[in-house]
Structures are given as C-alpha cells and as structure tokens.
Image (spheres, helix red, strand yellow):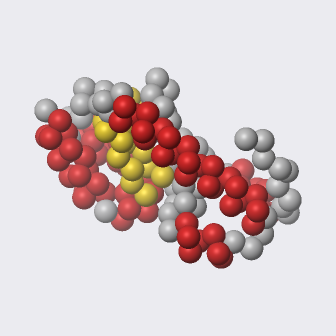
Amino acid sequence: MKHRKLETDAATSKRMGNVHLKGSKAENLLSLSLWHQGIRYRKNYKKLPGSPDIAITKYKIAIFVDGEFWHGQDWVNRKKKLKRNRDYWIEKIEENIRRDKKNDQLLIDSGWLPIHFWEKEVLKNLDSCVINILNRIELRK
C-alpha cells in the first residue's frame, strides 16, 4: 500500500526518525537472555515471512517483539485516542495488524510456531518471556 504523505512538524519528524525497526532494547535483552540459556538463533531472519526478530531454527520457533503502537496493542481503544493524522495512522496500523496475521498463518503452514511479545512486556518481565520460550522449546523437542 502506498501511504499518503504524513503532515507533521519538525519535532515529530525528528522523533519518528529515531524509531528503529531492528535491534530494539527489548529485542536485544531477550536474544541475549536466550543466548545465555544456550539457545542459538538467527536475528531478523529474512528467509521467513515477517523476518522474525529471533528465529530458533532448530525448533522452528519465530519470535517477534512488537511495538505497542506500531502493531496495535489495545487497538480498539487506542485508535479512538489518535488526534493528529488520524486517517493515516489508522490505515497504517491496521495494515500492520493484517500483515502480522498473514505472516503468522504462513509460518504455521510451514510448521513454525510464531510467538509475539509486546516490547514493554519484555522490558518489564524478561524472565517470564524467556521461561515462556523455553517451555515452548520443550514442547517441540
């Protein structure tokens, strides 16, 4: 989809320019914790739909660390609160949600298990996210 030009001011433009698509703090913490548990993986694995942030190829587990805004956490309520460039953001985020669902289904159809964590979930509860992944690995052995 070709998005309309976003109308914005200099401060917003600068803030949005600082958003990184790969290697967020949450992704790095999670991947490092898995590495210390002896789990080997690929980061941003482009051979899989959606380029998972962490792909544990041995067990066919694809892990995504999703930003709350970009991937539509609590989207029904959040979209009501959008004020600036409302139509643009609704279109953009709903496209992201559809793409995530499509990629999850493609992964499942290929025998992979997609797992999604919200960024804040990883930052606040890293240990429980790691335990969740380790439990899923045990089930796939």
Residue that appears at 17% across and 35% down: 140
Residue 114 quadrant? top left
Q: Is residue 96 left or right of residue 62?
A: right
Quadrant (top left, top right, bottom left, bottom right) of the C terminus: top left
Total labels drawn: 0
Residue 41 appearing in the image: no
Q: Is residue 80 above or below residue 104?
A: below
Quadrant (top left, top right, bottom left, bottom right) of the N terminus: top right
Q: Is residue 12 above or below residue 82?
A: above
Q: Is residue 89 left or right of residue 77?
A: right
Q: Is residue 97 above or below residue 108?
A: below
Q: Which one is nearer the viewer's eye here, 24 or 103?
A: 103
List x then y, in percent, for residue 49. Answer: 48, 31
List x then y, in percent, for residue 94. Answer: 62, 55
Q: Which one is nearer the viewer's eye here, 55 or 89?
A: 89
Q: Is residue 24 left or right of residue 85?
A: left
Q: Is residue 48 above or below residue 134?
A: above
Q: Which one is nearer the viewer's eye here, 83 or 27?
A: 83
Q: Is residue 67 left or right of residue 32?
A: right
Residue 82 quadrant? bottom right
Residue that appears at 42% across and 39% down: 105
Residue that appears at 32% across and 33% down: 112
List x then y, in percent, for residue 60. Answer: 29, 31
List x then y, in percent, for residue 91. Answer: 70, 55
Q: Which one is nearer the viewer's eye here, 59 or 22?
A: 59
Residue 120 appearing in the image: yes
Residue that appears at 20% across and 52% down: 131
